[in-house]
Image (cartoon, helix red, strand yellow):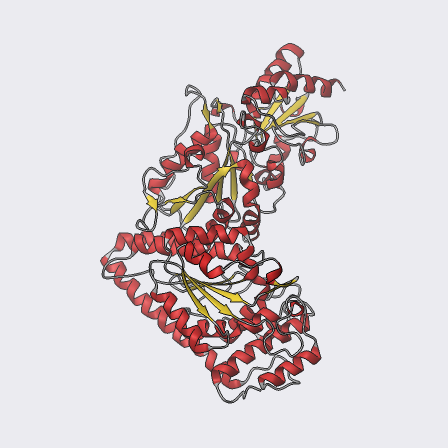
Amino acid sequence: MVDATENLDQLTINTIRALCMDAVQKANSGHPGAPMGLAPAAYVLFNTFLKHHPQNPAWIDRDRFVLSGGHASSLLYSLLYLFGYGLTLDDLKNFRQWGSRTPGHPEYGETPGVETTTGPLGQGIANAVGMAIAESHLAARFNKDDNALIDHHTFCMCGDGDLMEGVAMEAVSLAGHLGLGKLILIYDDNQITIEGATDIAFTENVADKFTAMNWHVTEVANGNDLTAIQAAIQAGKEETDRPSLIKIRTHIAYGSPNKQDTADAHGAPLGDEEIRLVKKFYGLPEDLTFHVPEAVLNHTRNAVASGENLENAWQDVFSAYKKAYPEDAALFVDAVSGFLTKGWDKDIPEFSTSDAPVATRAASGKVLNAIAPNLPALMGGSADLAPSNKTYLTCSGEFQKNGRKGRNIRFGVREHAMGGVLAGMYLHSGVRPYGGTFLVFADYMRPAIRLASLMNLPLIYVFTHDSVAVGEDGPTHQPVEHLAALRAIPGLHVVRPADANETAQAWRQALTTSNGPTALILSRQKLPVLDVSKRDGEFQYGAYAIQNRGKEADLILIATGSEVHISLKAAEILEKEHNIQTSVVSMPSWEWFEKAPAPYRARILPSEVTCRLAVEAGIGMGWEKYVGPKGAMVSIERFGASAPGKEVLEQLGMSVDNVVNQALSLVKG
């Protein structure tokens, strides 16, 4: 039995364990085992190492802490309560309840001190890598020899399940390549997952694997050995050339006589009787729930005063910085506040109908490189596709181990990690991230896109090669269902511009959007520049009429991207040869259109005109809302084929003739 009065550290650790058990038991839902095993390491980190100010969780030079194994959220909530972040015992008692600040997995924006939304395993590791990238870039950009504004670490706790996920291994590989020395990953090696012991599926040598990926590795044989844990974290901080893995052998549900080291403790409450036995083992009152000894609370709340002192010292540093480097200080405030630097959009080009046709991916590259010199916080890259995505910033170099000021990130062929890293970069603050790949590979990024949408992060995804017009590469590389799949994600703004000017406007709006990510869907093939003067309406509302016959129209053609041009040609034939009055609407973004004022939407799609035909080179799912019960769709309800892009489009119905024929059938009933 542990003597609870013997050691304040041990009493605090056991109190953390008991709070976690009690929260899960009261909710009758959750994961008590991992928090019980991880409590010593978490306590050492928060009590001894973490640079933080609990009363100002947004202080820019704080250390970041990410709980990648978000199922262990009761551990994080208990720490945030004890160390003075503003959570209360009532919050712990409301664990996993409707409207509480202690949801089942940590959610960014819901709980003070929660740096990111975690739960899907591996995502938190990718977020932490992004935070470490942002920290090192800002330090290189703003720190001076005599004044360091940015100097902090990113800590991440993970478990066996995290390290089985592909996204984690992609991110770990990238972090090792980049030599992110201020990233420390604490691995809860409890050797248990939901199905049982990890050796049924996971027998690799984790330490050797990380070493091979250029990580510094330290192993702690006993997860209750506070001295060894402290030494390992200190060694991680002293290693500056490589990220560090601390592999700690823990015991899930430590102290539980019947459930320690079993899968039963992973995802279910221990039960009242078992909790009493555990508390007896810990030397805690067996019949008290949510009990926090006064000595423990006084001890942990010291973090509030020490955190205030840390931030005050930093404020002195910043005051001196402002006097010595006023221009850099202003840029620093812009960056960390998320402000768009004054004049950021002054060089965005306007394209003319006299210009040669241009692929929207190429137009995007021109716009991006017009913005980048005036918006130094803009930073990103591509998943090994920069020459195709046109995502390289010519005004800057590469972000590499020996080049932290560079704004071009070489993500490598790591789409999933790229998505999670972008989120971490933004969550850190100080940079405005973007990332690119082919639209068909958005599937590899989907979990990260979903989480960014859940967190309302204004990331920008550049998805090129947007349709079967990709051509010869064939159906494996030709997206057909991807627009519908992305539109299904709540909070994601999907934008498919029809020409170079729409692309410029899409970038402008994406960068001024603060309530969620934007996916720019861009063409490989060249498209003519539309006549701006003929536009009837506002692009920012997501749809506008290029040719508007109003309520007198016989037909409305609604299209996106390259199909707008097909629709315009079809409308010309319908009017001249068949006397069918035809409006043509470009609808680059459903999401923006849904937020437009009702009178505007009624003007663009008047209810009096029920004969509507949507034209898009993808599946028609979702277009029913806009064409209505009397409308129809020209879409692609199959996979593509390997052939020249123009031929694939025509064979699959994306042609002027087919649109005309479908329109005639619709109008004539």
Q: Dividing the image into 4 quarters, which one contains the C terminus?
A: top right
Q: Is residue 166 left or right of residue 333?
A: right
* 150 in relation to 253, above or below: above
Q: How many marks?
A: 0
Q: Is residue 630 left or right of residue 589?
A: right
**Residue 424, percent across and down?**
46, 54
Residue 291 in view (yes/no) = yes
Q: Residue at x 60, y 57 (%)?
A: 201
- Residue closest to the eye, 37 or 44: 37
- Residue closest to the eye, 537 or 181: 181
Q: Dividing the image into 4 quarters, which one contains the N terminus?
A: bottom right
Q: Quadrant of residue 316?
A: bottom left
**Residue 435, percent across and down?**
46, 43
Residue 304 in view (yes/no) = no
- Residue closest to the eye, 204 or 509: 204
**Residue 562, percent across and down?**
54, 26
Q: Residue at x 48, y 81 (%)?
A: 9
Q: Residue at x 65, y 32 (%)?
A: 619
